């Protein structure tokens, strides 16, 4: 049964690639590329928020974010045979998803105000004091290390599932899982999400990225 729509899958892998690129360009000081990839990721994340409200069942925040009590119950019954079935993210994994999105949003926001004190600064750095910009730059560096920790934990959890003979990676690639007909999630046409992505991306390109991209190519 189809579980992850093409936007969720595309978002996931493009996001992982973008973060790898941002890590490399940020630490190597390749700021024009850093900014361009960051704007791409910004458009991707904003579209994911929209899709989290109007998209497929498995993308919707209301579908996978459960109360702490339900999550604790889930964790307690995780190893029993009659563990509750779920489609999409499990209740504990859902908190990790939300944490990721908050970390990435923080990284993008602080980046907009950051400066390398040489020639590159985020587009909003000029509207705040030098002290605020320095603080944002510091948070940008610290938050990235927290992100690296979260990514490590994410990969560790996926390896644990692999050891328990549950491969979560393949469904994130081809989108399908074997499920009971009754559990089948409702998937919305991903073309809508990609359309939203193009609209948000065009606005960001016009506002922030046009000069950089023209300069790069
Ligand atoms: C920068 C690196 C990465 C980040 C920031 C990241 C972040 C995320 C996020 C936010 C989700 C939730 C997707 C959504 O609902 O929209 C997710 C799911 C997932 N990720 Fe990653 N990811 C990263 C790398 C990877 C890698 C390298 C793998 C595989 C080796 C992977 C495997 C998965 C899988 C299998 C799921 C679905 C989990 C489930 O079944 O609930 N991720 N990831
Ligand atoms: C998720 C998105 C982002 C990631 C993962 C990321 C990652 C990084 C990393 C790893 C560094 C190096 C930090 C250090 O030197 O210790 C860096 C520096 C920097 N980033 Fe980002 N960044 C992101 C978004 C942005 C955005 C949106 C902007 C602005 C448009 C931006 C502007 C900067 C600037 C100006 C620096 C240089 C700061 C310095 O020299 O200390 N970043 N970023």
Image (spheres, helix red, strand yellow):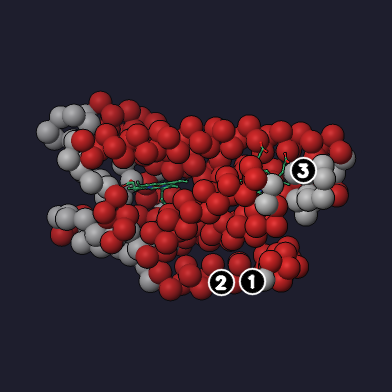
Question: Is any part of residue 57 visible from this angle?
Answer: no
Q: Residue at x 76, y 34 (%)?
A: 135
In the rendered image of this protein, does residue 67 appear above or below residue 193? above
Find disc 2 in the rendering and name its residue: 198
Q: Earlier in the sequence, mark 3 or mark 1?
A: 3
Q: Secondary structure at mark 2?
A: helix
Name the residue at the top extreme: 76
Q: Which residue carries the number 1 mark?
A: 202
Q: Which residue is mark 3?
A: 116
Q: Say whether mark 3 is within 8 Å of ligand 2.
A: yes
Question: Residue 117 in the image: x percent, y percent?
Answer: 82, 42
Q: Residue 9: which numbered mark, if any?
A: none
Q: Residue 50: give x, y in percent of width and height.
A: 52, 60
Q: Residue at x 67, y 71 (%)?
A: 217
Is 44 drawn above or below residue 190 in the view shown?
Answer: above
The residue depicted at 51 percent of the width and 73 percent of the height is 195
């Amino acid at each position: 049964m189809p579980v992850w729509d093409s936007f969720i899958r595309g978002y996931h892998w493009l996001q992982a690639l973008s973060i790898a690129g941002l890590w490399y360009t940020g630490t190597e000081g390749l700021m024009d590329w850093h900014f361009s990839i960051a704007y791409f990721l910004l458009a991707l994340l904003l579209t994911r928020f929209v899709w989290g409200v109007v998209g497929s069942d498995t993308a919707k925040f209301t579908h996978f974010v459960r109360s702490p009590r339900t999550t604790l119950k889930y964790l307690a019954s995780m190893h029993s045979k009659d563990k509750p079935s779920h489609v999409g993210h499990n209740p504990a994994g859902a908190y990790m998803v939300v944490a990721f999105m908050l970390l990435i949003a923080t990284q993008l926001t602080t980046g907009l105000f950051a400066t390398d004190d040489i020639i590159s600064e985020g587009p909003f750095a000029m509207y705040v004091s030098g002290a605020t910009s320095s603080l944002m730059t510091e948070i940008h560096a610290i938050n990235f290390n927290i992100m690296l920790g979260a990514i490590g934990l994410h990969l560790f959890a996926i390896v644990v599932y692999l050891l328990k003979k549950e491969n979560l990676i393949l469904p994130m690639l081809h989108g399908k899982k074997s499920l009971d007909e009754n559990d089948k999630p409702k998937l919305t046409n991903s073309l809508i999400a990609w359309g939203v992505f193009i609209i948000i991306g065009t606005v960001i390109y016009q506002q922030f990225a046009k000069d950089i991209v023209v300069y790069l190519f």
